[in-house]
Image (cartoon, grey):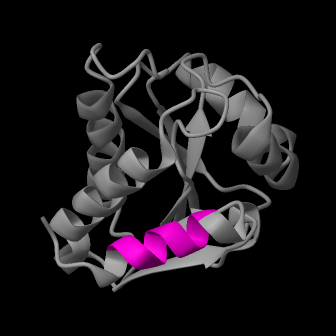
Amino acid sequence: MIVAVCADIATLRVDAIVNAANRWLRPGGGVDGAIHRAAGPELEAACEAIGGCPTGEARVTPGFGLPARWVIHTAGPVWRGGGAGEASLLSRCYRSCLEAASERGARSIAFPAISTGVYGFPRERAAAIALSAMRAYESRFALLVACCFNVPDALLYRRLLAQPPV
């Protein structure tokens, strides 16, 4: 099942949450900062030990102080107008996270809207890419959550979920 909610991803009781990280896995702002603050300093140390995450890939750490068992970190693409492979890279982010969660036996995973904040990816395009990836992996999970920062984004995801898959 795929659902869209408006919530703080760091509070969700799911097996894994996805962190919209930077390539260096250093604590930043937005979703990344909120996850790091909630998880505690152990998360930063674990990320430093990993050393980084190329755009489109995923790295996994324990959840430490979070309700989630794992944090799956992914570095989304910066929007450069759409002609620099951004859509493909964003799709790889979601698929890499879903693969990493599946490999660990996770049954539930929550995603933020990767790359739609300071990275500037258009929200509707990003949501369609996210839901396409989630639908492709839906049979492997009991619950896939699109965790939105605000009500308009949650309504966008719900509208797209109500439409037949493309």
* In magenta stretch: residue 155: yes
| Residue 68 at least partly seen | no
Total numbered labels: 0
Quadrant of the rendering where the N terminus is positioned = bottom left
Residue 56 drawn above or below residue 141: above
Quadrant of the rendering where the C terminus is positioned = bottom left
Q: Name the residue: 53% across, 18% down.
A: 52
Q: Name the residue: 71% across, 22% down.
A: 26
Q: Name the residue: 58% across, 71% down.
A: 154
Residue 69 locus on image (x, y percent): 59, 65
Q: Which residues are magenta?
A: 153-160
Residue 154 drawn above or below residue 10: below
Residue 146 locus on image (x, y percent): 50, 67
- In this rendering, position of residue 40 left or right of residue 108: right
* In magenta stretch: residue 94: no
Residue 81 drawn above or below residue 95: above
Residue 68 locus on image (x, y percent): 63, 67
Residue 121 locus on image (x, y percent): 49, 34
